[in-house]
Image: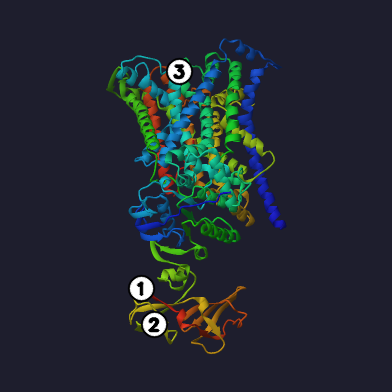
């Protein structure tokens, strides 16, 4: 026994080191920047002040961006949850051909920069839009503002809702529906009396996820927001347009409120109210009796959605080759040549920084997940709180926080690649943590205990026992950290510098200059890169004998 | 308090086949009928098609061929909600978002009964199933046995024409299982309800059924009362699956067709055993001996053997006896009547000719 105890003691030393490092990172790169944002809004040259707040409240219509943000997020929460549910239902319960294709199309927005959809919407429905001007001869800017934002954000949030709800529907015990049928319920009655009520917690969950994401969205409002001002873009304007950091900080604090409330509800209330039990029974098998109206309705929505998606991404592809969109559709390579002249530097930088940050993100995420799942220790809440914040706080605020925190000693990082990598790691860490937690909770702790009893220390146990078992999760975490790094915009737009340009801000700049062709060409390169990367990842994961877990 | 009155009807399957999209034939040309008011179990190993057969009767799967009648009505192409059956699922399938009361009232509400009618019916089955006082609980606040009773109550309250049960006791612990199966049988008899009961547990099937349908690889192996299934199994599979059996390979020497007897050589002795009319002299057969029909004696028996293993299990002793090249399993349920033989000792083997059952060894 004494020997066993001394081994555990050594394990604990490793653990303390890991936890200490984790807490240090969380304090330095999540809490401290946030603290900077909050403090600059109430603190000036050594004394407390309410001046920035008074200045904001003095503005006429100061509440408009807040109201706009919440209104948009509410609409998008509802629309994306409903479409996500319809999609999930169609995939899980309706016999459809080409399910793989529909699934891929539904998920495509996850792996592309979100504002590409806004660009596409302008190409289709803008003043020179293919459909508005080309088809109907209407020159209108109606797409700019709320309608365009609802369209593009619904498209970009739907995949998350779809994945959440499809997972839930898939693990719903099908015998509940069958029991309902044997008690005389028609498929439609079963749908409304059993499936719908059982899905309510999932629907609420996906509503809140979409809400959080919409509140945090920066790219779409930048491109297609028009006069519809939301908080994330207002903050950006304060910093870049007016160079008013205290004003930006005030708006950031305002933006934090709905984000954190929604996140709190999502994690504390909805997350714990679920009827889903994993039965281990296969579901989603073809059912002989289905309600015609519901299944054909769902099929209609799926097909319409798929066609819209193809149209939107197609317009970017075509737009990259069209001479002057809306005027002259002759094919040309001039947009690509233009990029070549500018240099592919932003694109290459994005790739390099994503490749560097992805393994670090996966590693830190896994370590955090391991600590959360397996090693209760005092102060764990601080790590969990930090990890939660990095997910809940909109990227725009993180961006502001980083330039405030790391522009001056002790740590000067602005303008470097390091700060971009750090922002990637701490923005994407939740993806790795969630993947790790999901994988770890499926592994019996006695495996690790057996390893420890046989004399292995924590690193050895991790390397020889845990890691081999959760390779698929690590790999998924890796792939999606990479994807999110390439497609990120909200935080990094504050952190790019002449030396370290990235591809997403570059595309945004082209759109703002009105060079849609160049933006489309750039976007096409990014989309092709992402699809290639994902296909390679799928191939690799299949060779490892696993499947790539899609994550939102 | 009104009691539940049911109009039970028979269930008939005629050459029913179910082929899944992967090409697996789960149910292959299955025919049997369940007389009104009787309980029939579908018994077989996992994957034998018994659950699929039940799901076909319920309408949860659609047959690829054959006809399925509930009462006089051909229901082959009817969806489940039009079949008028009740079903109890292995997982109970209680709606987690509804209270016990609302779970039981579910089907009644669909039928648009009045408030008072629903309340009366639900209370009646709550009484029937011994669930009084639990009606406001949620399913996750109930024990396994209570959930099971709610599932039954929910099916019975709709006065189904037939009740289908899919391994309803497999999630209960051993003691409760025995208690519940007696309860189910008593209830079924009292209500006179037609029931089809799927199980892989032979003791459940033996104790519950009027008729047992033994299934294997999607086909019916034998249909019969428990005593027929055990005493005169129709195939090697049935003999092996139900209870335990010693199979002794031999050949029929002669057949006395008039008296339905056959001469066979078993363990070096020529015996005159019962046989059906299908056998001819020269047929290769198994002589099937149940382990408990064999008696061990100190003195000479029909044959002599050596005790290879003796395991004392309280109410009985299990022996492995080597007789020539043959190893026999023997169960002695009366060890107190003679004595327990030790391993390595020589014993005489006795059994009655009437207890030998002949089975064709192949084909």
Label 3 CA crowd tier, 10 Å (few <14, some 14–19, many 20+): some
The residue at which mark 3 appears reads as: A145
Q: Nearer the viewer, residue A341 or B128?
A: B128
Judging from the image, mark 3 belongs to the subunit labelled A
Q: Position of residue B161 (x, y in %)?
A: 45, 52
Q: Does dot 1 land on a helix, a strand or a loop?
A: loop
Q: Position of residue A118 (x, y in %)?
A: 42, 23
Instruction: Let me know if residue A217 appears in the view.
Output: no
Residue found at the far bottom of this picture: B300
Task: Choose mark 1 or mark 3, whichever is in front.
Answer: 1
Residue drawn at the location 59% of the way across and 75% of the way down: B316
Image disc number at residue B362: 1
Residue drawn at the location 47% of the way across and 79% of the way down: B355
Image disc number at residue A492: none
Q: Does dot 3 land on a helix, a strand or a loop?
A: loop
Judging from the image, mark 1 belongs to the subunit labelled B
């Amino acid at each position: 026994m004494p020997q066993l105890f001394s081994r555990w003691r050594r394990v604990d030393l490793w653990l303390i080191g890991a936890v200490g490092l984790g807490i240090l990172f969380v304090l330095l790169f999540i809490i401290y920047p946030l603290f900077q944002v909050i403090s600059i809004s109430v603190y000036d040259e050594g004394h407390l002040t309410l001046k920035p707040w008074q200045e904001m409240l003095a503005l006429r219509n100061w509440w408009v961006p807040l109201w706009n943000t919440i209104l948009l997020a509410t609409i998008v929460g509802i629309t994306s949850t409903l479409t996500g549910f319809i999609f999930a239902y169609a995939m899980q319960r309706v016999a459809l051909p080409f399910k793989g294709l529909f699934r891929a199309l539904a998920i495509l927005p996850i792996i592309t920069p979100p504002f590409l959809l806004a660009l596409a919407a302008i190409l289709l429905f803008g003043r020179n839009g293919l459909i508005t001007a080309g088809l109907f001869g209407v020159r209108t800017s109606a797409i700019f503002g709320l309608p365009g934002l609802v369209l593009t954000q619904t498209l970009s949030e739907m995949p998350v809702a779809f994945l959440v709800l499809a997972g839930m529907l898939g693990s719903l015990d099908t015998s509940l529906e069958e029991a309902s049928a044997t008690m005389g319920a028609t498929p439609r009655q079963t749908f409304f009396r059993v499936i719908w009520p059982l899905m309510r917690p999932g629907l609420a969950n996906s509503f809140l996820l979409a809400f959080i994401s919409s509140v945090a969205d920066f790219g779409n409002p930048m491109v297609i927001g028009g006069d519809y001002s939301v908080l994330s873009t207002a903050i950006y304007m304060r910093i870049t347009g007016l160079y008013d950091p205290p004003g930006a900080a005030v708006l950031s604090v305002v933006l934090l409120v709905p984000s954190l409330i929604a996140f709190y509800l999502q994690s504390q209330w909805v997350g714990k109210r679920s009827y889903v039990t994993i039965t281990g029974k296969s579901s989603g098998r073809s059912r002989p009796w289905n309600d015609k109206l519901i299944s054909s309705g769902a099929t209609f929505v799926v097909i319409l959605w798929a066609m819209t998606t193809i149209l939107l991404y197609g317009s970017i592809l075509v737009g990259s080759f069209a001479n002057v969109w809306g005027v002259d559709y002759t094919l040309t390579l001039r947009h690509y040549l233009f990029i070549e002249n500018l240099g592919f530097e932003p694109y290459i930088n994005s790739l390099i920084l994503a490749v560097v940050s992805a393994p670090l993100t996966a590693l830190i995420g896994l370590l955090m997940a391991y600590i959360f799942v397996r090693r209760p220790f005092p102060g764990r809440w601080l790590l969990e709180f930090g990890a939660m914040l990095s997910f809940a706080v909109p990227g725009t605020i993180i961006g502001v926080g980083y330039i405030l925190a790391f522009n001056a000693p002790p740590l000067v990082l602005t303008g470097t690649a390091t700060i971009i990598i750090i922002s990637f790691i701490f923005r994407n860490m939740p993806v790795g943590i969630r993947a790790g937690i999901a994988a770890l909770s499926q592994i019996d702790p006695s495996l690790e205990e057996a390893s420890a009893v046989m004399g292995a220390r924590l690193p050895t146990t991790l390397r020889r026992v845990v890691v081999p078992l959760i390779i698929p999760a690590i790999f998924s975490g890796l792939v999606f950290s990479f994807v999110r790094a390439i497609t990120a915009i909200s935080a990094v737009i504050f952190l790019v510098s002449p030396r370290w340009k990235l591809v997403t801000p570059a595309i945004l700049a082209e759109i703002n200059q009105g060079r849609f062709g160049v933006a489309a060409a750039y976007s096409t390169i990014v989309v092709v890169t992402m699809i290639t990367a994902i296909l390679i990842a799928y191939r690799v994961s299949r060779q490892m004998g696993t499947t790539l877990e899609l994550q939102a | 308090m009104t009691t539940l009155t049911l109009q039970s009807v028979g269930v008939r399957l005629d050459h029913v086949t179910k082929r899944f999209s992967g090409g697996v034939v789960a149910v292959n040309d299955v025919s049997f009928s369940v007389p009104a008011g009787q309980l029939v179990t579908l018994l077989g190993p996992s994957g034998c098609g018994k659950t699929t057969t039940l799901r076909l009767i319920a309408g949860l799967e659609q047959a690829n061929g054959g006809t399925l009648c509930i009462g006089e009505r051909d229901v082959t192409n009817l969806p489940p909600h039009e079949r008028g059956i009740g079903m109890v699922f292995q997982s109970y399938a209680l709606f987690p978002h509804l209270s016990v009361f609302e779970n039981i009232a579910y089907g009644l509400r669909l039928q648009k009964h009045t408030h008072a009618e629903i309340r009366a019916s639900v209370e009646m089955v709550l009484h029937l199933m011994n669930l009084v006082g639990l009606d406001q609980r949620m399913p996750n606040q109930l024990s396994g046995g209570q959930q099971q009773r709610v599932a039954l109550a929910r099916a019975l309250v709709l006065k189904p024409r037939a009740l289908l049960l899919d391994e309803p006791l497999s999630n209960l612990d051993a003691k409760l299982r025995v208690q519940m199966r007696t309860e189910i049988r008593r209830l079924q008899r009292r209500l006179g309800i037609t029931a089809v009961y799927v199980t892989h547990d032979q003791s459940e099937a033996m104790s519950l059924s009027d008729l047992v349908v033994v299934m294997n690889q999607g086909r019916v192996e034998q249909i019969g009362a428990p005593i027929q299934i055990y005493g005169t199994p129709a195939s090697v599979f049935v003999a092996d699956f139900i209870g335990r059996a010693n199979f002794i390979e031999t050949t029929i020497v002669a057949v006395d067709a008039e008296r339905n007897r056959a001469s066979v050589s078993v363990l070096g002795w020529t015996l005159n055993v019962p046989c059906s009319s299908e056998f001819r002299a020269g047929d290769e057969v198994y002589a099937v001996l149940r382990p408990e029909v064999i008696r061990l004696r100190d003195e000479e028996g029909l044959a002599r053997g050596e005790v290879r293993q003796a395991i004392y299990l309280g109410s009985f002793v299990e022996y492995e006896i080597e007789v020539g090249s043959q190893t026999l399993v023997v169960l002695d349920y009366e060890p107190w009547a003679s004595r327990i033989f030790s391993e390595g000792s020589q014993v005489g083997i006795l059994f009655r000719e009437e207890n030998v059952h002949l089975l064709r060894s192949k084909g």
